Image (tube, coloured by chain):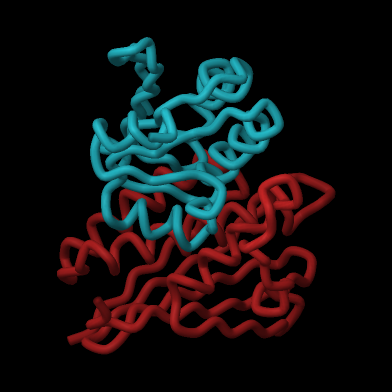
């Protein structure tokens, strides 16, 4: 999998993921994803347009970091997931602990809470 | 129309790549829709990983079989392993509505298989776990 980090307008951080979030793919980005999201205790956009598949191992990684951010009052906003991936996020209940945005502008708004 | 493919895998997660390649080809040959292909990949990934990680607690080299068949109405997946008894349909249901701090990190795999499949059936026969998963075709 690929993981890149961007800074958007207003200093908002965006972690972009691409590839298959299966066992192998998730393990390949796990340490960097933790370091770039949960460990920093800051709200972050996770852009998923390039993710074509997610299994429970990928959901676990996302949930673990949401749980780490939550007590610090910070959150993850997921941005542009593909249809099937979004379905799995929702079937896993991640939509009740994080927001899902259709595009970057909406993600920024949700992150700022406006 | 019907087709079947079978593969024997070792209890090593590196084997999942070989399984995925086989399934991608089988899906292309049999016109799986995007949804069908996703459901098959998900069921195979979750249930094969469970077998590899938990079927043989004492470790060692083992193999298990995965058989995939398809006709106009359904895609059927059958797993056979000689590991310790494990009945996925009896695995407790997940409560995904709990607040984030109460949410367990594990246990989601079988929850997702239940969501993506239409039937799951388990039997223990001749010291083997046999698990059938059915994915109905023609669903949106």
> How many numbered marks appear?
0
x then y, percent, for residue A23: 51, 41
In this image, B97 relative to A87: left or right?
A: right
Q: Could you tell me residue B52's position as x and y percent?
A: 64, 51
Give the residue displayed 61% in from the left and 58% down from the top. Answer: B108
Of residue B14 and residue B50, the one placed in the foreground of this image is: B50
Q: Which chain is red?
A: B
| Residue plotted at (72% across, 79% down) | B90
The picture places residue A97, in percent across and down from the top left corner, at: 56, 48
Residue A53: image location, x then y, percent: 36, 48
For the point 26% across and 44% down, the residue is A102
Q: Nearer the viewer, residue A25 or B62?
A: A25
Could you tell me which residue is drawn at 41 percent across and 52 percent down?
A: B19
Chain colored cyan: A
**Farthest residue toward the right?**
B58
Which of the two residues, B19 or A68, is positioned nearer the viewer here? A68
């Amino acid at each position: 999998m690929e993981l890149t980090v961007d800074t958007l307008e207003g200093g908002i951080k965006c972690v972009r993921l691409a590839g298959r979030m299966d066992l192998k793919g998730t393990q390949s980005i796990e340490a960097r994803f933790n370091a770039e999201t949960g460990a920093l205790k800051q709200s972050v956009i996770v852009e998923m347009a390039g993710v074509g598949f997610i299994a429970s191992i990928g959901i676990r990684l996302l949930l673990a970091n949401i749980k780490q951010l939550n007590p610090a009052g910070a959150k993850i906003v997921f941005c542009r997931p593909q249809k099937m991936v979004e379905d799995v996020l929702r079937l896993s209940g991640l939509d009740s602990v994080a927001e899902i945005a259709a595009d970057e502008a909406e993600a920024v708004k949700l992150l700022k809470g406006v | 129309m019907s087709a079947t493919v079978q593969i024997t895998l070792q209890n090593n997660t590196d084997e999942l790549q070989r399984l995925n390649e086989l399934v991608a080809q089988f899906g292309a040959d049999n016109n799986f829709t995007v949804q069908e292909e996703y459901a098959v990949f998900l069921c195979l990934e979750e249930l094969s990983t469970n077998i590899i990680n938990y079927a043989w607690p004492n470790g060692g080299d083992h193999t298990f079989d995965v058989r995939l068949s398809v006709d106009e109405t359904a895609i059927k997946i059958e797993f056979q392993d000689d590991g310790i008894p494990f009945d996925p349909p009896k695995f407790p249901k997940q409560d995904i509505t709990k607040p984030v701090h109460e949410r367990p990190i594990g246990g989601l795999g079988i929850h997702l298989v239940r969501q993506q499949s239409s039937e799951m059936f388990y039997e223990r026969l001749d010291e083997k776990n046999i698990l059938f998963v059915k994915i109905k075709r023609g669903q949106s």
